[in-house]
Amino acid sequence: MINIVALLLFIMVVLTLINGMLFFKKLIKLQEENNNLLKKLLSAESDESTGKAMPSEDIEKLKAEFLKNRKKYD
């Protein structure tokens, strides 16, 4: 009886660790995607020498791309 409980506890611990690793892998992918989008925003901002705000169309395109990629990872 004790061996069964110990085995089940061990299985629960292993499954929890696997779940944590998968979660952090997904989190790292989302952070990388977020960093790439921020780099695009920064490069688009630095390309404009006049210092004007980014056009709303470009912001909407980046937002749509971000949301599309976010749903891909969910």
Image (cartoon, rainbow, N blue to C red):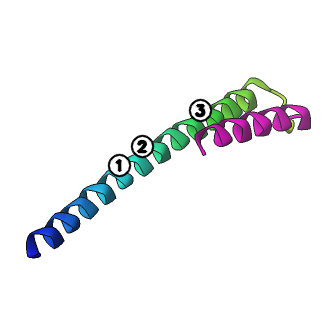
Left or right of 16 in this view: 61: right
- Evaluate whether residue 51 shows in this view: no
Q: Residue at x 71, y 29 (%)?
A: 46
**Residue 30 versus residue 47: which sits nearer the camera?**
30
Q: Amino acid at mark 3?
A: Asn
Q: Amino acid at mark 2?
A: Lys
Nearer-the-camera pick, 38 or 66: 66
The one of 27 and 50 positioned closer to us in this rendering: 27
Q: Which one is in front in this view, the residue at disc 3 or the one at disc 1?
A: 1
Q: Which residues are magenta?
A: 54-74
Q: Which residue is mark 2?
A: 25
Please state the horizontal and vertical placement of residue 29, each as a whole percent of the image.
50, 39
Find the distance from the CA under tag 2 to the CA under tag 1.
Answer: 6 Å
Q: Is residue 63 visible?
A: yes
Label 3 near label 2: C-beta < 8 Å? no
SS class of the residue under badge 1? helix
Q: Main secondary structure of the magenta part?
A: helix
Q: Is residue 9 left or right of residue 3?
A: right
User: Does residue 69 belong to the magenta stretch?
Assistant: yes
Left or right? Give the position of 48 relative to 16: right
Q: What residue does disc 1 label? A: 21
Q: Which is more N-terminal, label 3 or label 2?
A: 2
> Quick check: 9 above or below 43?
below
Q: Position of residue 9 (x, y in %)?
A: 21, 68
10 in magenta: no
To which residue does mark 3 refer? Answer: 36
